[in-house]
Image (cartoon, rainbow, N blue to C red):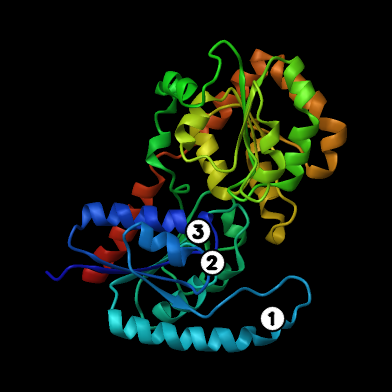
Amino acid sequence: MKPYKFIISGGGTGGHIYPAVAIANELKSRYPGAEFLFVGANDRMEMDKVPQSGYAIKGLWISGIQRSFSLKNLIFPLKLILSLWESRKIIRSFQPDLAIGTGGYASGPLLKVASNKGIPCLIQEQNSYAGITNKWLSAKVKKICVAYDGMELYFPSEKIRLTGNPVRQDLLDVSNKREESISFFKLDSQKKTLLVLGGSLGARRINILINSSLDFFSKLGLQIIWQCGSYYFESYKEKEFGNVHVHAFLNRMDLAYAASDFIISRAGALSVSELCLVGKPIIFIPSPNVSEDHQTKNAKSISAKGAAILIAEKDLDTQFEDEFYRLFNSEDIQLQLSKNCKSLGKPDATQEIVAEIEKLLKEEKD
């Protein structure tokens, strides 16, 4: 039997790229002879990140529609038409057995062409609010893997499979890495640790909050691992002193999670999935500046189950210190949040998604 050929598209952000690569890696482990081709958007981060992961990628001239008025929107129809044309050429040349989309601009035209040609397609939606691209594709694809309940609001229910989001496998046993993490970050093993995450680029409002709360945290005896982001590192690196450890980026997220007793984080889809696996007390501060306010929806889906605390940016000045103090002083609240959060984790998400892909391959053979 000839080796399978998989064409995969997902990009624009790490939240789309990482699941795509994780699915490819799992497929590669099951089908060592398989061929893979990624398709991304020119000038987006997938054009660098995917080759770094060992896979070939082709780029399309495609971008999203701007939410506010922009002249860029005027050329969107041209970009879409040309991307559909280029996708046809790529698919005709590569002849894939199956197409996989994890969201992002390029997955729209690629999977639209693939599904129209009768190639079985699977899409994976990371968020609790479906993106425009995946909603557009849902009518023609065969399977839709999701991470949250209630996604039949956006997709045909008979196509939905609740699998969770692919996560890094090194996060599955962080409870065994406490000593290593204390040494790695040069922490005091007798003190509680707060981990602050604003995303790889950083979150301005979270950084302002942490900077203004340093005395408050110091009075509680906390030490801080503060990922302020590459955009903000120059502004906050001087705050590195004693119990405050400032980082532009954290390369060992497994050790950061292992060291932490409390976590403050944005609520991007992959962050939420990782944090549910880790199961530490979390305060989500979702970004209000993302499409359809999907981070707030992600955070609400977790906090509604008693698995995290949610504070909107607009309420930080009035609510943050009281909420954090209440959490810090109640072991019962900490244990309950951790237990509920851990119960929502889906450590086998990647394997379950690939199992759905295997079913589609079998259906095609039959």
Q: In the current view of this chain or complex, which residue is farthest to the left?
A: 1
Sequence-first disc among 2 and 1: 1
Q: Residue 4, which numbered label? A: none
* Label 3, label 2: how far apart the Cα atoms are: 6 Å
Q: Amino acid at mark 3?
A: His
Q: Which residue is mark 3?
A: 16
Using the rendered image of the protein, determine whether residue 19 is visible from the camera's viewpoint: yes
Circle 1 packing at 10 Å, graded few (<14), some (14-19), many (20+), is: few
For mark 2, what is the residue?
104
- Residue 139, above or below 127: below
Residue farthest to the right?
A: 318
Q: Disc 1 marks which residue?
A: 72
From the viewer's side, name the closer residue of 112 and 208: 208
Q: Residues within 10 Å of mark 2 (few under 14, many from 20)?
A: many
Q: Are marks 2 and 1 in contact (CB under 8 Å)?
A: no
Distance from the alpha carbon under mark 2 to that under mark 1: 17 Å
Mark 2: amino acid: Gly
Whole-percent x and y of residue 192?
61, 17
Given contact means CB atoms under 8 Å apart, are the residues at marks 3 and 2 in contact?
yes
Residue 13 or residue 335, whichever sits in front: 13
Q: Which x, y percent locates residue 27? A: 28, 56
Amino acid type, mark 1: Lys
